[in-house]
Amino acid sequence: MIGNLFSASDCGVYIVTGATGGIGRAIVDGLAERGVKNIVLGVRNLNAGEKIARMYGGTVAVELLDLASFTSVCSFASRILASEIPVRALINNAGVLASRKDITVDGYETTMQVNWLSPVLLSYLLMPRIEKGGSILFTTSFMRRVCRVTSHWHKLSTGKFNRFKVYAWSKLMLAQTARYMSAELRRNGIYINCTDPGIVDTEILRLGYRVVDGLADCILRPVISTPRQGAECTFRALEASDSGCVFTRRGCRPIAMRDSRHVSFSAVKSVINKAKILLNNEL
């Protein structure tokens, strides 16, 4: 637990979500290699998280975080806030590519909540602890380029489901929200950016079809990026003094503005306002 390992007098912590595998695990390894001593893993599987933490001794804390539940997000945030430990960076890496339509306990389609709404909610809730000069990063995807912004995303809980379209929407909405946040929070001295690791050899590529996954293992995986390579853009973003950008392995560029009329910031703000009530109950 964070309160048992770190104190308010420590240097700012680095929080990594989705840290038990893939790019998230590579980010944790990279932080440790760079001498970062205070790392918090936000994970759904505590056993997996604690197994990783034991590899690094007392430099890594593990906290339960299920992005499919706003209550869990608020509970996680309340523990960070209560510790009074400053946050140097919040790395929102966790994401899903759901194989079927599933509705969370909060009434949202799972991919949209886990990939978009919950990371944004967590970022706003932890804002009081982010150090001046600190960073909030969101992992987006190249798939955001293959869809259009829609004002009908909330109907995903009742309409026809296409896993790839929904995933692309979630990553596009995330990037556009990050663009909005970077302009809003620039005066606070907090850097808000996205990372786009490209196609990376992680479990999210598994589609659940034996033949397709087998072909992907033989043909695709040998030529795509490793998780360690995919994590390079995260460290590029952490070391930069830019805000409102997308970082890749090759460089960075400002987040492209899409049709912001359809980016439902009102929905995000509604989720945040509801969550603040839950958070107050936690504190």
Image (cartoon, rainbow, N blue to C red):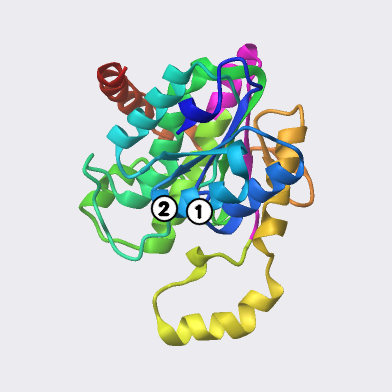
Residue drawn at x 23%, y 55% is 159
Q: Judge whether residue 207 can be spotted in this image.
A: yes
Residue 94 located within the stretch drawn in magenta: no
Residue drawn at x 39%, y 45% is 114
User: What secondary structure is marked by label 1?
Assistant: helix
Tell me the quarter of the image containing the C terminus.
top left
Please provide percent x and percent y for residue 273. Answer: 31, 20
Please provide percent x and percent y for residue 63. Answer: 43, 38
Question: Which three-letter amino acid code belongs to the residue tagged 2?
Answer: Asn
Q: Is residue 60 left or right of residue 166?
A: right
Q: Judge whether residue 141 can be spotted in this image.
A: no
Q: Which range is magenta?
A: 180-198
Q: CA distance from mark 2 to mark 1?
A: 6 Å
Mark 2–mark 1 contact, CB under 8 Å? yes
Question: Which three-letter amino acid code belongs to the residue tagged 1?
Answer: Lys
41 in relation to 124, above or below: below
Q: Which mark is residue 47?
A: 2
Q: Which residue is mark 1?
A: 51
